[in-house]
């Protein structure tokens, strides 16, 4: 009986492999091979000099030694600090606003009308190309841009007060891109604007996943909105918060297009808005694939460590306990 | 998530394996052996003692390959526009003053293919460096345009052809100025490119401000006010008292010193050096900014306070060549400007036509070069585009042409600038002139008081060494 069945049964499993093959083929050619060659190039001297390629010649850890030399005033550590600062300035308002919006959208008592519309609207900035948005903001905050116009109007209304200030010179304009704080703030602001919608949607999904009966029973027991938020929502969406945090951090590490367009690839003032990937890009653009690869490898390692952190922090602790007690549940 | 973790683990393992295997790569050679022998001479700097030798043996001539397509590389549409001006309109070319949108599709029955790669972020150079070494096949590159900052690199490379080998003779170059010729002559005495325009520059000032200040806009009188740096600074103070500024930004005068420096950016040992002239300029410009002689523009170009039209007519002068008229300055104030020599005549920019090694249209390339640089067409192009012709005959005839220099109130600006190009030294032009922009931008932070001069110079070295890994800090 059993042998008869086996003969009759058509094996469809192999078709599954055919169907997923295109992904793997494309992945290997366009992602895996470049990734591996990046690792290889990071250990080589490989650059272009006046149109002629030099290398790749194996030089061991020389590129890393050069890049990890922190004695210069501007070095990789400084660029990491710049990147992290710009990211965190944008991330803090992003997570606060997203949490607030997500909890409002899901609040049983508020029953917001047209929430689908607002969800689309807050997600929209993410659809526009980052370079275009930064060009737009560059003009907004330019010397003679609308922002300065508004400030100017405000001050010229108070001209009686301003007349004798600043050596008799009237207020002209504020150079946003000559101020470290303003430049970083504008870049972070764009990041915030582009990503808070995305984060809101993620958190929404997480909050919707929380059992409604929990809120209902809390309500019956007399809990107010703040209490249900801090005691029910936050603890239950913690794994997703960790996920949002880490993915945003990895995304932030790779920050490039906005500061690059905004500062004309210089990272000025005083290179304080130069991110790690802008540094990498300068070297790659100059044809120095060896050093650029070394920076990419360092970024890869940091991102990989952060990814593993997601799993470690986001794992199901009860499942871990069950495994330890030998009850057979699988980890993760 | 489980799968993701597994794939990341797999990736890391593979990546590590990859690096181990990489050690056995057959391409591995002993490092630095080849680097020494291929190092170019003194950073591709111009050697003014070398003059181009335009007589070549008959056997060295590059024969026409009977190509079926004229393939041209450029970083913007400008050369295509000019080429169409000369060869368009059914082959007879256009007249001065004609407006045309046509882009010529064939010359002498050979189709034209014009490939544009914008120069931003070095994209154009990357394109050239990728395509020129493999310039074979059925449709090779025939002509490539190159800009002043990069020209020395390609003059001394094998990617460009000696134009004598395609039939350019001493007669064709007789009317050209020595500066563009020296720049396009390789250290081995081969002429590698020709230019139909030159870029001498001086001081462009606003007539209405001159009248308001001194009751005249006559160039000769104004020249007395700006004849040297000390007089210019006295004039700047005078202008400030009336609410005007001498220049728009601290960097506007940069190219006056950049083309006067005596040593190239990079010496023969690959050290990056900053010429003393440049360092003196930094100090002077810092003073200008602190004294309020600039309009407070953050950077050159970039609009805002620099922009001619939107800074409310408060800026007295800009330092630039004639391509400023149409390329950088506004249209609202057109006609309200005039040119004079200023404290120092200088050179800024230039583009060169080069024949690509591997061309299969040698005869047509030579024809394009000869026609574009002829007396007739350099003159017409200069009048049409507000340019300076790289042709002494055209320069002498320029003043008698109709409709010249409408931007500068009909002034014969070519006559003024001709003094700049005559006998100008190209001794500091080198393959690393792209560093001048890096330097200028690095100084902005010092001018604006964000950091000290030493820190700004430090930033310049950091940026330069990121871009050119094989150069060294020459301090």
Image (cartoon, coloured by chain):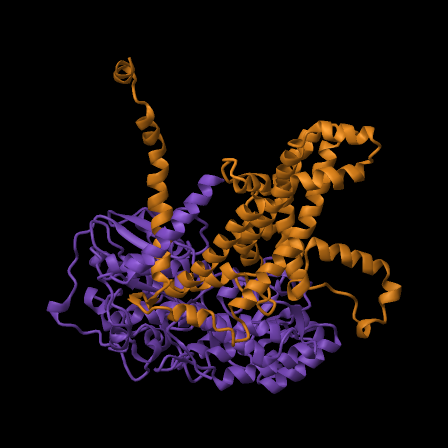
Chain colours: A orange, B purple
- Horizontal and vertical percent for residue A24? 35, 39
Q: Residue at x 20, y 64 (%)?
A: B166
Direction right: furthest residue: A160
- Horizontal and vertical percent for residue B291? 70, 79
Hey, which quadrant is residue B457 in on the image? Answer: bottom right
Q: Residue at x 48, y 53 (%)?
A: A304
Question: As drawn, is B167 to the left or to the right of A39?
Answer: left
- Horizontal and vertical percent for residue B68? 21, 48
Would residue B294 be seen by someone viewing this image from the given angle? yes
- The relative height of residue B99 versus residue B257 in the rendered view (above or below) is above
**Viewer-side residue, B373 vs A320:** A320
**Viewer-side residue, B369 vs A145:** A145
Hey, which quadrant is residue B83 in on the image? Answer: bottom left
Tally of numbered discs: 0
Q: Residue at x 61, y 62 (%)?
A: B307
Question: As drawn, is A98 to the left or to the right of B174?
Answer: right
Would residue A112 be seen by someone viewing this image from the given angle? no
- The relative height of residue A82 versus residue A11 in the rendered view (above or below) is below
Direction left: furthest residue: B59
Question: As drawn, is B221 to the left or to the right of A297?
Answer: right
């Amino acid at each position: 009986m059993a042998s008869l069945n086996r003969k009759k049964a058509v094996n469809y499993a192999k078709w599954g492999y055919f169907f997923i093959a295109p992904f793997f083929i494309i992945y290997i050619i366009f992602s895996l091979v470049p990734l591996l060659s990046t690792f290889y190039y990071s250990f080589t001297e490989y650059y272009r000099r006046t149109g002629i390629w030099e290398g790749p010649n194996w030089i061991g850890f020389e590129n890393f030694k050069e890049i990890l030399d922190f004695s210069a005033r501007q070095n990789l550590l400084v660029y990491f600090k710049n990147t992290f600062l710009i990211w965190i300035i944008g991330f803090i308002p992003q997570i606060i606003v997203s949490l607030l919006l997500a909890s409002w959208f899901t609040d049983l008592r508020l029953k917001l009308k047209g929430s689908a519309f607002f969800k689309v609207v807050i997600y929209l900035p993410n659809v526009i190309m980052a370079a275009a948005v930064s060009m737009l903001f560059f003009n907004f905050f330019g010397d003679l841009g609308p922002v300065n116009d508004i400030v100017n109007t405000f001050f010229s209304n108070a001209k009686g007060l301003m007349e004798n200030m600043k050596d008799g010179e009237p207020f002209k304009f504020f150079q946003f891109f000559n101020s470290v704080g303003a430049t970083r703030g504008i870049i972070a602001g764009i990041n915030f604007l582009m990503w808070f919608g995305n984060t809101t949607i993620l958190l929404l999904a997480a909050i919707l996943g929380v059992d409604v009966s929990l809120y209902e029973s809390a309500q019956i027991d007399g809990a107010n909105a703040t209490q249900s938020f801090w005691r029910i929502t936050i603890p239950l969406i913690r794994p997703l918060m960790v996920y949002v945090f880490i993915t945003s951090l990895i995304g932030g590490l790779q920050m490039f297009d906005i500061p690059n367009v905004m500062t004309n690839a210089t990272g000025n003032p005083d290179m304080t808005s130069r991110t790690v990937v802008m540094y990498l890009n300068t070297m790659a653009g100059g044809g120095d694939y060896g050093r650029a690869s070394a920076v990419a490898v360092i970024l890869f390692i940091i991102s990989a460590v952060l990814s593993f952190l997601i799993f470690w922090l986001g794992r199901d602790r009860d499942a871990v306990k069950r495994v330890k007690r030998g009850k057979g549940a699988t980890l993760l | 998530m489980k799968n993701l973790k597994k794939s990341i683990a797999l990736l890391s393992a593979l990546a590590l394996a990859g690096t181990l295997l990489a050690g056995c790569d057959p391409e591995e050679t002993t490092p630095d052996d080849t680097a020494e022998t291929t190092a170019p001479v003194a950073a591709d700097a111009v050697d003014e003692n070398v003059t181009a030798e335009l007589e070549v043996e008959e056997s060295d001539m590059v024969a026409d390959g009977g190509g079926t397509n004229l393939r041209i590389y450029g970083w913007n549409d400008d050369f295509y526009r000019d080429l169409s001006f000369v060869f368009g309109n059914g082959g007879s070319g256009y007249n001065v003053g004609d407006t045309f949108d046509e882009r010529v599709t064939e010359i002498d029955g050979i189709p034209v293919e014009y490939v544009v790669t914008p120069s931003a972020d070095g994209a154009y150079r990357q394109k050239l460096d990728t395509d020129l070494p493999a310039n074979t096949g059925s449709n090779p590159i025939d002509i490539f345009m190159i800009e002043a900052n990069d020209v020395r690199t390609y003059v001394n490379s094998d990617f460009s052809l000696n134009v004598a080998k395609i039939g350019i003779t001493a007669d064709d170059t007789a009317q050209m100025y020595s500066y563009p010729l020296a720049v396009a002559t390789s250290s081995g005495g081969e002429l590698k490119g020709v230019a139909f325009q030159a870029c001498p520059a001086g001081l462009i000032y606003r007539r209405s401000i001159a009248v308001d200040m001194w009751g005249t806009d006559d160039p000769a009188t104004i020249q007395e006010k700006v004849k040297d740096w000390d007089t210019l600074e006295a004039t700047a103070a005078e202008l400030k008292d009336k609410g005007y500024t001498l220049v728009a930004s601290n960097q506007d005068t940069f190219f006056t010193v950049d083309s006067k420096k005596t040593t190239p950016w990079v010496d023969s040992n690959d050290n990056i050096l900053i010429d003393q002239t440049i360092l003196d300029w930094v100090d002077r410009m810092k003073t200008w900014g602190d004294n309020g002689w600039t309009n407070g523009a953050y950077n050159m170009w970039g609009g805002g306070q620099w922009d001619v039209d939107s800074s409310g007519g408060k800026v007295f002068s800009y330092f630039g060549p004639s391509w400023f008229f149409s390329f950088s300055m506004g249209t609202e104030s057109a006609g309200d400007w005039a040119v004079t020599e200023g404290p120092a005549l200088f050179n800024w920019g230039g583009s060169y036509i080069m024949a690509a090694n591997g061309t299969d249209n040698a005869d047509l390339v030579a024809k394009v070069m000869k026609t574009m640089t002829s007396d007739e067409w350099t003159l017409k192009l200069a009048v049409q585009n507000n340019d300076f012709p790289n042709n002494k005959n055209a320069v002498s005839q320029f003043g008698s042409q109709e409709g010249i220099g409408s931007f500068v109130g009909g002034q014969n600006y070519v006559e003024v600038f001709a003094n700049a190009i005559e006998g100008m030294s190209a001794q500091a032009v080198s393959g690393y002139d792209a560093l001048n922009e890096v330097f200028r931008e690095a100084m902005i932070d010092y001018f604006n008081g964000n950091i000290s001069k030493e820190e700004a110079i430090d930033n310049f070295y950091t940026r330069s060494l990121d871009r050119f890994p094989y150069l060294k800090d020459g301090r």
